[in-house]
């Protein structure tokens, strides 16, 4: 009986190789994960947490993108680390600059204000949430509808484009 063994290992002190990923194209994920949780902190204080059923990282011409789907929940925190606003959607896209686009049955909720639409983009630079789609904003005793809006992350100040609405006064 002859036994032949071969090994493909090299000396780790002398050989440092990166994984070969040249065959991965722009339309194929570099990596995938299921039951994803991404946390962003600043100076040790939690700023946002993103939960998703599935995530895939793609290469783009300018860097990478994170594609999230199977139910998205983005929780935004205030400067003290207290949960302030929640965004839920069917899927999301996180760009290299940390801008986040959410799409499909999007709901944004914060302290009695609920915004529903089909698409939003949250800018990491100015911390504003925007959409150019039909939107409904509900607060106690008022409903506002319109085509397009922008708001701060806490939903304290918002602007509706091409809006209509109704308000109810207690007698």
Image (cartoon, rainbow, N blue to C red):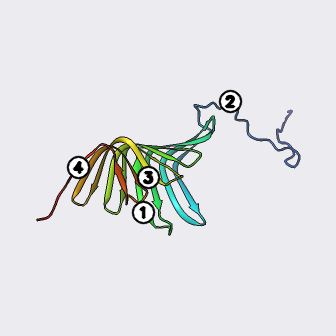
Counting residues from the N terminus, which is met first, the one under dot 2 or under dot 1? 2
Quarter of image, res 104? top left
- In the displayed structure image, the side of residue 163 where residue 62 appears, left or right: right
Seen from the viewer's position, the closer of residues 34 and 167 is 167
Q: Pointer 3 and pointer 2: residues touching (CB < 8 Å)?
A: no
Rounded to the nearest angstrom, the CA distance separating label 2 from label 1 is: 43 Å
Residue 169 coordinates in the image, percent (x, y): 16, 61
Circle 2: element type? loop
Image height of 20 relative to 158, above or below: above
Q: Pointer 4 and pointer 1: residues touching (CB < 8 Å)?
A: no
Q: Pointer 3 and pointer 1: residues touching (CB < 8 Å)?
A: no
Counting residues from the N terminus, which is met first, the one under dot 4 or under dot 3? 3
Q: Nearer the viewer, mark 2 or mark 1?
A: 1
Q: Can you say which quadrant of the picture contains the C terminus?
A: bottom left
Counting residues from the N terminus, which is met first, the one under dot 4 or under dot 1? 1
Quarter of image, res 90? top left
Circle 1: element type? strand
Q: Which residue is mark 3?
A: 73
Q: What residue do we see at 83% from left, 39% from top?
A: 7
Rounded to the nearest angstrom, the CA distance separating label 3 from label 1 is: 13 Å
Rounded to the nearest angstrom, the CA distance separating label 3 from label 2 is: 33 Å
Crowd tier of the residue under label 2, counting other residues whose Cα lies within 10 Å: few below 14, some 14–19, many 20 or above: few
Counting residues from the N terminus, which is met first, the one under dot 3 or under dot 2? 2
The circle on residue 165 is 4
Counting residues from the N terminus, which is met first, the one under dot 4 or under dot 2? 2
Q: Which residue is mark 2?
A: 23
């Amino acid at each position: 009986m002859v036994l032949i063994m071969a090994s493909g290992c090299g000396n780790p002190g002398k050989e440092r190789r990166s994984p070969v990923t040249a065959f991965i194209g722009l339309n194929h994920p570099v990596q995938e994960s299921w039951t994803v949780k991404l946390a962003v902190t600043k100076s040790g204080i939690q700023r946002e947490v993103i939960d998703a059923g599935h995530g895939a990282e793609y290469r783009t011409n300018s860097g990478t993108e994170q594609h999230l789907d199977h139910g998205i929940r983005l929780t935004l925190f205030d400067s003290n680390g207290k949960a302030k606003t929640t965004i839920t959607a069917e899927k999301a896209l996180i760009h290299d600059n940390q801008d986040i686009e959410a799409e499909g049955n999007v709901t944004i909720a914060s302290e009695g204000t609920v915004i529903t639409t089909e698409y939003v983009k949250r800018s990491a630079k100015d911390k504003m949430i925007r959409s150019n789609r039909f939107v409904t904003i509900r607060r106690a005793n008022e409903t506002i509808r319109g085509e397009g809006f922008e708001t701060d992350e806490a939903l304290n100040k918002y602007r509706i484009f091409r809006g209509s609405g109704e308000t109810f006064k207690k007698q």
